[in-house]
Image (spheres, rainbow, N blue to C red):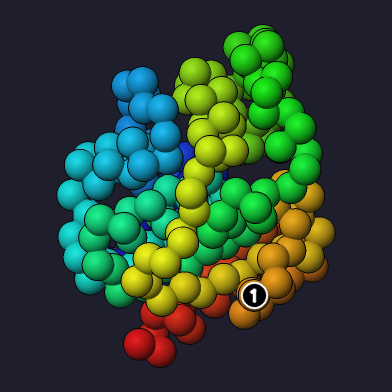
């Protein structure tokens, strides 16, 4: 089984075709926000709601990759694939670091209403997201301990133009894209996931 976790403010809609061509794949939505304060808390909620079992593959974009890192600390998985994500807070760009202290002041509800008027999947997902969850996770990332010494095989694909999580040093595949390569370069991302999963 492959479990695919979305980015912050996103859901399963960020993984449209060709993602659906992956076999035995489950696209996760964030559980209803219940006051989780840390990425570890969110990881526990995801594991509980989706009953993730050992031996699964975890794939995650942005926040989804970070939460997937946390899940590997509780469940022995077959492998972890980060798609434009980070394995530690040190890899997160200065933009998010600078904005994090002020996220509580951002009028996310108003921004969501405006975003909902734009006929794109990305803005619709953002409109439907929980502002409290977004605010809390922005702060939580800055306190995250990261993957550290978790016993997991890590595979990474990343955009060379990513401004949110600038290109890390150890990445197997790089693409000519930004932070949303799971959407903008879906074919290449799916091919990478398929290659990694089939090789083991």
Specify the quadrant that holds the C terminus.
bottom left
Residue 151: where, in percent of width, then height? 34, 71
Residue 95: where, in percent of width, then height? 78, 39
- Residue 156 in the figure: left or right of residue 42: right
Asked whether residue 16 is in view, the answer is no
Q: Quadrant of residue 37?
A: top left
Specify the quadrant that holds the N terminus.
bottom left
Residue 168: where, in percent of width, then height? 69, 66
Residue placed at 68% from the left, 11% from the top?
A: 105
Residue placed at 33% from the left, 60% from the top?
A: 72
Q: Nearer the viewer, residue 80 or 41?
A: 41
Residue placed at 22% from the left, 40% from the top?
A: 49
- Residue 167 in the figure: left or right of residue 33: right
Residue 73: where, in percent of width, then height? 31, 58
Q: Quadrant of residue 26?
A: bottom left
Q: Nearer the viewer, residue 118 or 62?
A: 62
Q: Residue furthest bottom?
A: 199
Where 115 falls versus 142 (above or below)? Answer: above
Asked whether residue 120 is in view, the answer is yes
- Residue 173 in the figure: left or right of residue 177: left
Residue occupied by mark 1 = 170
Residue placed at 51% from the left, 34% from the top?
A: 140
Where 176 falls versus 120 (above or below)? Answer: below
Total number of numbered discs in the rendering: 1
- Crowd class of label 1 (few under 14; some 14 to 19; many from 20; radius 10 Å): few
Where 131 falls versus 191 (above or below)? Answer: above
Where 174 falls versus 84 (above or below)? Answer: below
């Amino acid at each position: 089984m492959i479990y695919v976790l979305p980015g912050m403010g996103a859901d399963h809609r960020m993984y449209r075709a060709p993602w659906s061509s992956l076999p035995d794949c489950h696209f996760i939505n964030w559980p209803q926000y219940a006051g989780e304060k840390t990425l570890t808390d969110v990881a526990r909620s995801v594991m509980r709601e989706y009953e993730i079992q050992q031996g699964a593959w975890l794939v995650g974009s942005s926040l989804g990759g970070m939460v997937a890192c946390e899940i590997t600390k509780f469940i022995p998985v077959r492998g972890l694939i980060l798609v434009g994500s980070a394995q530690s807070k040190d890899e997160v760009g200065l933009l998010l670091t600078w904005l994090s202290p002020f996220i509580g002041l951002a009028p996310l509800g108003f921004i969501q209403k405006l975003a909902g008027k734009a006929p794109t999947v990305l803005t619709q997902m953002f409109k439907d997201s929980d502002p409290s969850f977004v605010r809390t996770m922005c702060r939580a990332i800055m306190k995250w301990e990261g993957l550290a010494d978790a016993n997991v095989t890590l595979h990474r694909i990343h955009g060379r133009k990513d401004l949110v999580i600038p290109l890390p040093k150890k990445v197997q595949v790089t693409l000519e894209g930004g932070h949303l390569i799971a959407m903008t370069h879906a074919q290449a991302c799916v091919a990478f996931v398929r290659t990694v999963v089939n090789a083991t």
